[in-house]
């Protein structure tokens, strides 16, 4: 059977102060649709995987938010991490859980905070992807044709096409967040795609890959064999999970494995990983400004994001170009969009100087 794993434990610090540790971006309604990014991700996969086979992986502190936003999810389908250890350990645990329920199960792994505008194309890509990975020992990632030399994304270089398939290629290399000049080379070559962070494989194949390429992580979770999907799973994870090395699935497995493939897709994708990404996909006024949850009176402001948590607040601004203005709770940020990658570090500085109450 087919399963879906939705990873929803991140803190979204690049969207601070709009996104807070107590309520990160995946739980926010960014577009006024009445559904959070997590709920939109859940809705999007239901045509492919039924709710009873959708697994949610999150940090323990977000369990109440999960239950509030997705009340119909069974308790056993919410896997609560006792510590933050990046994507490799959580995917290894999810694969173990699924394999215990269904040794022949296949799975798609989705981030909870991405935007997909072309849902029909997304569904078709996943159906093709499932068929591909169910046909052999294959690890598959989705690749997005780049529209710009973006330096905030990882890149996948495709190699030879796979006979008998359309849009599937062997992966030649991964490159994480290149500088601008290298990103321009990637764009012009036609061989490189953005790494969407969406993966498909059988539980069997990814667990085999962990044992081959990340044996330290594999060893942590192998100790729980016989306990997964049972009454003792939670107690074991509480003891074992914090000892797993903190690592991403890309570094731990995908960049090392020899059976990695990419499916090139056009699904209207954005990872919504930054204010600039939000700006690029949001409606803008005649001066290129984006407003989120606020009323704006502006003079000579251009290409600026105004994101305010209080819908009743009026913002009056003059002479701002290419800025983020975010006023949420006890924090106000006024920062150039081009320097937005520094916001994550600023959050750490705020925590060190003024305490966790502000983050």
Image (cartoon, helix red, strand yellow):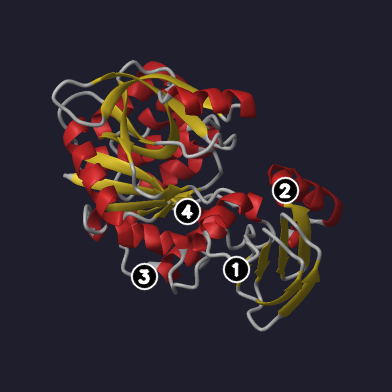
Q: In this view, does 334 lie above or below 148?
A: below
Label 4: how many residues lie within 10 Å, few (<14), some (14-19) or many (20+)? many
Residue 15 in percent (x, y) is at: 64, 55
- The span from disc 4 to disc 1 (Cα, nearest Å) is 25 Å
Q: Residue at x 17, y 28 (%)?
A: 165
Mark 3 or mark 1: which comes first in sequence? 3
Is 100 left or right of 252, judged from the image as shown? left
Residue denoted by label 3: 71
Q: Residue at x 30, y 28 (%)?
A: 139
Q: Residue at x 40, y 36 (%)?
A: 145
Residue denoted by label 1: 285
Mark 4 or mark 2: which comes first in sequence? 4
Which quadrant, please, contains the C terminus? bottom right
Residue 177 in percent (x, y) is at: 58, 30
Residue denoted by label 4: 113
Under circle 1, the secondary element is loop
Residue denoted by label 2: 343
Residue 294 lies in quadrant: bottom right
Residue 75 visible here = no
């Amino acid at each position: 059977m087919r399963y879906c794993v939705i990873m929803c434990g991140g803190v979204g610090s690049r969207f601070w102060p709009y996104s807070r540790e107590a309520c990160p971006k995946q739980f926010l309604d960014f577009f006024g649709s009445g559904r959070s990014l997590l709920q939109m991700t859940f809705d999007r996969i239901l045509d492919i995987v039924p709710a009873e086979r959708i697994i949610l992986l999150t940090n323990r502190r977000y369990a109440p938010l999960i239950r509030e936003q997705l009340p119909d999810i069974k308790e056993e389908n919410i896997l609560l991490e006792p510590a933050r250890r990046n994507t490799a350990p959580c995917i290894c645990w999810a694969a173990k859980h699924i394999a215990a329920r269904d040794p022949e199960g296949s799975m798609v792994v989705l981030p909870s905070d991405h935007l997909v505008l072309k849902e029909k194309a997304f569904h078709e890509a996943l159906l093709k992807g499932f068929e591909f990975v169910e046909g052999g020992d294959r690890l598959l990632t989705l690749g997005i044709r780049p529209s710009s030399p973006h330096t905030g994304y990882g890149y996948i270089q495709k190699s030879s096409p796979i006979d008998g398939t359309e849009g599937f290629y062997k992966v030649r290399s991964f490159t994480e967040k290149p500088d601008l000049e290298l990103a321009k080379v990637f764009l012009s070559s036609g061989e490189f795609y953005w790494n969407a962070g969406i993966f498909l494989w059988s539980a069997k194949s990814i667990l085999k890959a962990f044992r081959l390429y990340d044996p330290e992580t594999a060893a942590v979770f192998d100790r729980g064999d016989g306990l997964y999907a049972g009454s003792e799973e939670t107690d074991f994870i509480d003891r074992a999970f914090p000892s797993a090395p903190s690592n991403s699935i890309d570094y731990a497995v995908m960049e090392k494995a020899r059976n990695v493939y990419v499916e090139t897709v056009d699904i209207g994708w954005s990872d919504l990983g930054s204010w600039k990404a939000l700006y690029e996909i949001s409606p803008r006024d005649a001066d290129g400004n984006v407003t989120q949850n606020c009323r704006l009176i502006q003079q000579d402001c251009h290409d600026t994001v105004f994101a305010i948590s209080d819908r009743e607040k009026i913002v009056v601004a003059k002479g701002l170009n290419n800025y983020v203005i975010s006023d949420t709770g006890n924090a106000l940020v006024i920062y150039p969009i081009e320097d937005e990658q520094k916001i994550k570090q600023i959050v750490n500085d705020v925590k060190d100087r003024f305490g966790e109450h502000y983050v």
